Image: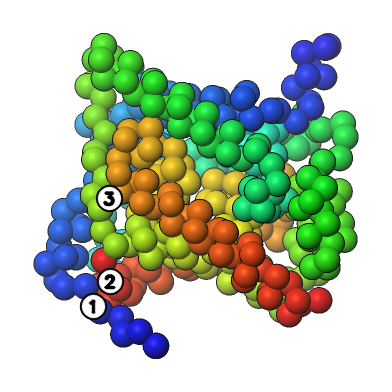
Amino acid sequence: MEIFELIRKPWPWYIAGPLIGFTVPILLLLGNKSFGISSSLRHICAAVIPANISFFKYDWKKEAWNLFFVAGITLGGFVATYLLTNPDSLIVAESTKASLTQLGITDFSGLMPADIFSVENILSLKGLIFFVFGGFLVGFGTRYAGGCTSGHAIMGLANLQWPSLVATIFFMVGGFFSTWILLPWLLNLVR
Amino acid sequence: MTTIKNSSAAEIELLDKNEDSYDGTNQQSRTESFIGNLKYLIVGVFFGIVFVKAEIVSWFRIQEMFRLDSFHMYGVIGSAVAVGLISLQIIKRFKIKTISGEEVSIPPKHFNKGQIYGGFLFGLGWAITGACPGPLFAQIGSGFLVVIITLLSAIAGTWTYGLLRSRLPH
């Protein structure tokens, strides 16, 4: 029972990081698959809305493993949230909390701020910015860059690929710019 | 306003030739059956659990990372890279084969300017949504159903990239 209690608590980085790192050899040894997740978005396009665009004309069924993988991630999210529920609420760093409070974020109880990520915001400016615009940038940017944090920052860096280092550096540059300049402006817009 | 230089046909052709260097490629010569693909579903479940239990699917953790208020995300990514790197070295050094006996092969990544422009644009979205593509799926599984909209929009973004690809600088 003690082990179960330990599993239910949030996992520290030195447990989670290595487990994520092990996904790299596991996928390779199971079937010569390179770790990467954003490609699933492209396969969905190729399978559902190819629209005669050459970028979506390829044998996506050969890459279907990736769709099984993301279906698994969704299921894993469910298992972790509903069966291995964290007994306490999320602890957010005090300085982050203070900065976000100033920007109008009030609810720090869940994994995601309820002020933004709730169903009633879907048809509002908040929804347009945080779900539609943000999501669009994630999908457009990762494909333009040829990968995301998994494909470049983990798989690419682990395989010592310098283009992945370039991509990872610009992921971080974009993230810092967004956090310090874009986000305060956007949060003021929707306040 | 900067002018956007169109990618030449030769550049796009080169990109297509390097298609194998996209993330998540499958280099196995044998095709996977439906049952065979279930292996990856199981790996995904395990992975999704790690994502949520380490709270890296949390919007707040991403904020902490970019505000330099917490080491957590840097520790996760750094140790994941370290473990991945060491295991790849072991696989290469000892020529460890896949379970179906094939030689492990990882296509090299080729540089193009998309890694700069696209990387920056993804970074913007990363801090806004608090998610990269993997965590998007885990957030939906965690019950944040509005993230379905984010995911649909990410698919639309990917589709738009495919549409505009030859007109973007690479």
Q: Quadrant of the C terminus of chain B?
A: bottom left
Residue corresponding to mark 1: B6
* Spatial CA span between label 1 and label 3: 27 Å
What's the image's color scheme? rainbow
Judge by depth and name the residue closer to the eye, B167 or A91.
A91
> Crowding near pointer 3: few (<14 within 10 Å), some, many (20+)?
few
Is mark 3 in CB contact (under 8 Å) with mark 2? no
Q: How many marks?
A: 3
Is mark 1 in CB contact (under 8 Å) with mark 2? yes
* Residue at image coords 77%, 13%: A3
* Spatial CA span between label 1 and label 2: 6 Å
Q: Quadrant of residue B113?
A: bottom left
Q: Residue A145: horizontal and vertical position, in percent?
A: 37, 57
Numbered disc 3: secondary structure:
loop
Q: Quadrant of residue A10?
A: top right
* Residue at image coords 51%, 61%: A174
Q: Read off the chain for label 3.
A: A
Looking at numbered disc 3 in the image, what kind of residue is underneath it? Asp
Q: Which mark sits nearer the N-terminus, 1 or 2?
A: 1
* Spatial CA span between label 3 and label 2: 26 Å
Q: Read off the chain for label 1.
A: B
Q: Is residue B58 above or below residue B45?
A: below
* Residue at image coords 79%, 68%: A103
Q: Which mark is residue B169?
A: 2
Residue corresponding to mark 3: A59
- Residue lying furthest bottom: B1
